[in-house]
């Protein structure tokens, strides 16, 4: 009853088992310190790499395992159960790699994907700017073609893995007059001339994840690093989000699961008025509600991921639902988990306050839950004519 | 090609052992089996030596019932190249004398090697005798409680051995056996591809006849020692329990310890 | 009936005889009274303390066989195995006892194979079976969850390694001094002990300690461990630790008590800020008296503690230190 059974293949079970072992043995002992001191988990990334987890979302031709969004989500969930911040060192690399997987040409894929698959380097996705958040079309970073190079100028903000990634999928405008239709995507290596890492953010939660500013100062990008063609950047971003959104949903799900497990355990240990607090209806109903909400969210997340993997076209609405639902559940469950633990829950000695802080971002990034509801509503509206 | 042989044992996970409060006996059913924790350090060290040397084969072997194959598959998933299961009804009830004989016969059957590695002791038997025993049968040096490999070449090694006064620095020429302790390394997590390959790997079963083990040295009859009885020690129970951290609490504890002549 | 030789293979560190040697000598003398035994202590070492040798006769030895040589100053397993073997083959003992120390555990298993003897490791009790005069050896297995009594009916010698501090030293034997010195015989060895490093950090003789003061996750960080050291010093204890503290790097591995560390059974054990996972318990639950200090009233350590204090270790331990002044 701790987690509903789904029909997983032998391979999926093994992946979850590996993620579980890494989470319990390697991540759990250091999550508190890494959160407190905002340490980036480089040695954990090495372990993700050695255990083949980064290969999961990379096609087989490029030294990956050619698996889908579902497998990526299963792993992200299991790691997030222990640390939602360190999970981003995994899932964030998938986000950075998807533009290359989806739109890269043979040469680009051959050059970059095997490195990401092996965990030799991680990838980052660089879209957001100070004035381009939900309004992704408003990017001000420009890319001007000069000979066989593009010259990039501008600043990206809040880039997950930004300070450590070797490979960045960067969105810049090649034709500012065209708005979102003028946006293009480039593969930028961290050693390219004119690429700088700006300030590292100090955050409420997911503090073991690196969130950095990227500065492009006449950054020289070879023309062969343009993804697809000029002007399709917005489409690349949206297609990428369709793939990656279940990852955020899975992260939220894992955080919720972790908090629920802590609350359940604590409620059976903690005694007040001579009995375990789980014997009080006020507490156990809260925990029963947590379990129900998590399972409902899990059903939505898993099925959405499977639909995407099955090649289903119209998944944007479900993706949005899964992300929104799971992240709202994560916020509710972690809030209640602190309540169950009472004063102890508020203290840093117990992990639930961290889970609460980690949960919040899942309602915000990769499209705020408000934007997601816009997406859901728009998708629904498209279907209204089908109703008789 | 160079070769490393790692001997492991499948043991019940001590963390999962429970004592039946009614009968005061150990409940063994349903307890998951794991690779003896000390053997994990031996496997890891073998893999690290292989990575350093290249052109090296790591063979992992265990003696046990058919289900011990599971432990071998786990070792394969970590990166060992080959596994051998020493299994035969005749091996049952072997003590450390007979076990080390059987394992030494397996080494002879495998052929040439550079180093034999195993854990300091198994967490079920806790004897720490089988490792040095194998070396004694093979007439090779054994270095117990290895905490660090300072240098390791195919025919020479410089090693730190943990002792109760500190540690010894030891030089060894030629082949030898070493037993690993926790200080030696941090075992890796298996890789997905390793796990999937390990599921499919062929694991040969070797029996007494195949390794040329003589009946007089194996199993119950080949074992000099006999278990007369086994029993659980009386269960330990909690005693006095107080709450608070004031000076009175501290005073009470000191008084209690003095009264019991403990300090 | 002929005398039956009971040989204690002693241990010498830096010329000093290890206390386990006296413990086993006394036990051998006690067992010997029941089987017409003759207690010989075999000592290999370099420049062995003469006073220490004398004490063997006070504690029960009928004879001491000494091999004193510079080459035995360091533990070259091959030299020890070959030279001990020679004496054992000559003396044909009925029983051989050795301390279950790192040295004993390195050498004795090799000898047992060479002599085709039964060997029982880490014994915590020894007795004689009345009908057969056989040695009954009791030892823990499964981390102390199971005790087994073992005998060796058809092979001699019957060999045991015995945990230090299990048996008491009896100083009242007053036997006549009888020393045989034997020449060291150099054998081929492919190993060479380059150096013996006495390290503060690694010199953690937990197995020998009467009082062990262990700290765990609750200690919080490396700096805070000083409180554990201070308390241990004050109470003449040795510092131990749980796996969590070792893995966090607060204190080195030789301090670890538990399944993948050392097994201890002191008279008094303090578990401070240790929740008491099964893996820790197997390493310390045979301690005579266990004191637990932990904030969490539900910590499993309280189930086995003789004296539990639910409270903040940073409050209570400094008070204990002050009270002991």
Image (tube, coloured by chain):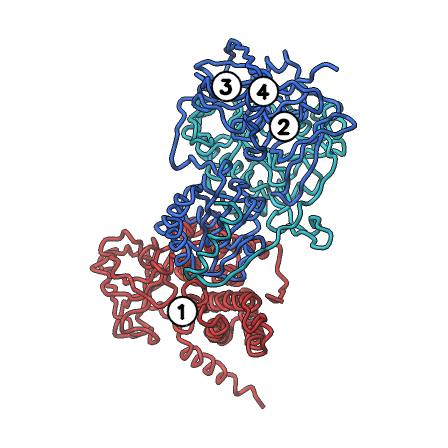
Chain colours: A red, B cyan, C blue
Q: CA distance from mark 1 to mark 4?
A: 70 Å
Q: Which mark is residue A357?
A: 1
- Kindly report the distance in space between the C-alpha atoms of the residues bearing marks 1 and 2: 58 Å
Task: Say few, some or many: other residues with alpha carbon within 10 Å of mark 4 (under 14 / 14 to 19 / 20 or more).
Answer: many
Q: Secondary structure at mark 3?
A: helix
Q: Is residue A295 above or below residue A227?
A: below
Q: Label 4: which residue?
A: C61
- Foreground residue, B202 or C58? C58
Mark 1 or 4: the one toward you: 4
Chain bearing tag 4 is C
The residue identified by callout 3 is C53
Pinpoint residue B69: horizontal percent, then vertical percent.
Answer: 66, 41
- Which residue is under mark 2? C160
Crowd tier of the residue under label 2, counting other residues whose Cα lies within 10 Å: few below 14, some 14–19, many 20 or above: many
Label 4 in the same subunit as label 2: yes
Horizontal and vertical percent position of residue B164: 47, 32
Q: Secondary structure at mark 1?
A: helix
């Amino acid at each position: 009853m701790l987690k509903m059974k789904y029909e997983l293949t032998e391979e999926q079970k093994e992946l979850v088992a590996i993620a579980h072992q890494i989470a319990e043995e390697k991540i759990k002992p250091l999550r508190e310190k890494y959160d407190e001191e905002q340490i980036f988990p480089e040695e954990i990334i090495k372990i993700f790499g050695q255990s083949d987890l980064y290969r999961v979302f990379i096609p087989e031709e490029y030294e990956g395992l050619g698996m889908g969004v579902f497998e990526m989500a299963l792993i992200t969930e299991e790691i997030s159960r222990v640390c939602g911040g360190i999970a981003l060192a995994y899932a964030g690399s998938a986000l950075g790699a998807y533009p290359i997987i989806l739109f890269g040409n043979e040469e680009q894929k051959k050059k970059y994907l095997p490195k990401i698959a092996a965990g030799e380097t991680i990838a980052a996705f660089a879209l957001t700017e100070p004035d381009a958040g939900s309004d992704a079309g408003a990017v001000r970073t420009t890319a001007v073609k000069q000979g066989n190079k593009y010259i990039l100028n501008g600043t990206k903000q809040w880039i997950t893995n930004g300070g450590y990634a070797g490979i960045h999928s960067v969105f810049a405008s090649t034709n500012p007059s065209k708005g979102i239709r003028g946006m293009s995507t480039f593969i930028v290596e961290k050693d390219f001339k004119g690429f700088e890492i700006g300030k590292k953010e100090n955050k409420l939660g997911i503090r073991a994840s690196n969130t950095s500013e990227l500065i492009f100062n006449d950054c020289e990008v070879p023309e062969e690093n343009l993804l697809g063609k000029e002007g399709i950047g917005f489409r690349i971003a949206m297609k990428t989000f369709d793939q990656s959104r279940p990852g955020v949903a899975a992260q939220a799900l894992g955080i919720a699961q972790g908090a629920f497990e802590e609350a359940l355990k604590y409620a059976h240990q903690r005694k007040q008025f001579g009995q375990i607090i789980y014997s009080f209806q006020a507490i156990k109903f809260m925990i029963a509600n947590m379990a129900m909400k998590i399972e409902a969210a899990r059903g939505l997340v898993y099925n959405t991921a499977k639909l995407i993997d099955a090649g289903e076209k119209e998944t944007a609405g479900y993706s949005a639902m899964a992300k929104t639902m799971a992240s709202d559940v994560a916020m509710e469950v972690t809030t209640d988990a602190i309540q169950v633990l009472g004063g102890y829950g508020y203290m840093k000695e117990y992990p639930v306050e961290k889970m609460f802080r980690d949960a919040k971002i899942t309602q915000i990034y990769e499209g705020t839950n408000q934007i997601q509801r816009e997406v859901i509503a728009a998708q629904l509206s498209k279907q209204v004519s089908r109703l008789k | 090609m160079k070769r490393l042989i790692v001997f492991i044992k499948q043991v019940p996970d001590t963390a999962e052992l429970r004592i039946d409060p009614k009968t005061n006996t150990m409940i063994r059913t349903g307890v998951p089996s794991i690779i003896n924790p000390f053997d994990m350090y031996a496997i890891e060290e073998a893999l690290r030596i292989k990575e350093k040397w290249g052109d090296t084969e790591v063979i992992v072997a265990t003696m046990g019932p058919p289900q011990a194959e599971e432990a071998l598959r786990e070792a394969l998933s970590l990166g060992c190249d080959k596994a051998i299961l020493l299994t035969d009804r005749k091996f049952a009830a072997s003590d450390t004398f007979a076990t080390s004989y059987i394992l030494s016969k397996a080494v002879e059957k495998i052929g040439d090697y550079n180093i034999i590695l195993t854990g300091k002791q198994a967490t079920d038997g806790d004897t720490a005798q089988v490792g040095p025993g194998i070396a004694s049968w093979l007439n090779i040096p054994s270095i117990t409680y290895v905490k660090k490999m300072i240098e390791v070449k195919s025919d020479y090694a410089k090693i730190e051995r943990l002792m109760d006064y500190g540690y010894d620095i030891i030089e060894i020429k030629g082949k030898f056996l070493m037993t690993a302790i926790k200080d030696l390394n941090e075992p890796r997590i298996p890789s997905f591809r390793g796990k999937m390959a390990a599921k499919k790997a062929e694991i040969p079963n070797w029996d007494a006849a195949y390794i040329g083990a003589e009946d007089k040295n194996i199993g119950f009859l080949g074992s000099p020692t006999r278990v007369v009885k086994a029993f659980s020690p009386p269960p330990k129970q909690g005693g006095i329990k107080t709450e608070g951290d004031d000076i009175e609490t501290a005073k009470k504890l000191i008084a209690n310890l003095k009264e019991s002549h403990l300090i | 009936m002929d005398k039956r030789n009971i040989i204690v293979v002693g241990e010498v560190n830096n010329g000093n005889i290890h206390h386990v040697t006296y413990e086993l000598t006394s036990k051998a003398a006690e067992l010997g009274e029941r089987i017409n035994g003759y207690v010989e202590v075999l000592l290999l070492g370099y420049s062995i303390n003469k006073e220490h040798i004398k004490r063997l006769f006070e504690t029960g030895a009928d004879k001491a066989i000494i091999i004193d040589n510079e080459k035995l100053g360091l533990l070259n397993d091959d030299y020890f195995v070959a030279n001990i073997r020679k004496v054992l083959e000559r003396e044909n003992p009925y029983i051989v006892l050795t301390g279950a120390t790192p040295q004993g555990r390195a050498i004795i298993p090799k000898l047992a194979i060479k002599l085709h003897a039964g060997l029982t490791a880490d014994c915590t009790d020894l007795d004689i079976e009345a009908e057969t005069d056989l040695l009954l050896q009791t030892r823990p297995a499964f981390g102390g969850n199971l005790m087994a009594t073992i005998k060796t009916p058809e092979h001699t010698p019957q060999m045991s390694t015995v945990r230090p501090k299990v048996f008491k030293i009896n100083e009242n034997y007053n036997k006549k001094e009888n020393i045989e010195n034997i020449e060291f015989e150099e054998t081929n060895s492919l190993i060479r002990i380059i150096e013996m490093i006495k390290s503060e950090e690694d010199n953690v003789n937990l197995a020998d300690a009467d009082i062990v003061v262990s700290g765990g996750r609750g200690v919080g960080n490396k700096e805070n461990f000083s409180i554990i050291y201070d308390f241990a010093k004050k109470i003449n204890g040795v510092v131990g630790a749980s796996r969590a503290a070792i893995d966090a790097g607060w204190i080195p591995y030789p301090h670890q008590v538990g399944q993948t560390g050392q097994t201890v059974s002191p008279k008094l054990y303090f578990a401070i800020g240790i929740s008491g996972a099964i893996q820790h318990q197997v390493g310390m639950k045979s301690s005579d008296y266990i004191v637990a200090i932990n904030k969490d009233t539900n910590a499993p350590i309280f189930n086995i503690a003789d004296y539990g204090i639910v409270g903040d270790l940073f409050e209570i331990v400094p008070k204990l230190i002050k009270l002991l002044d």
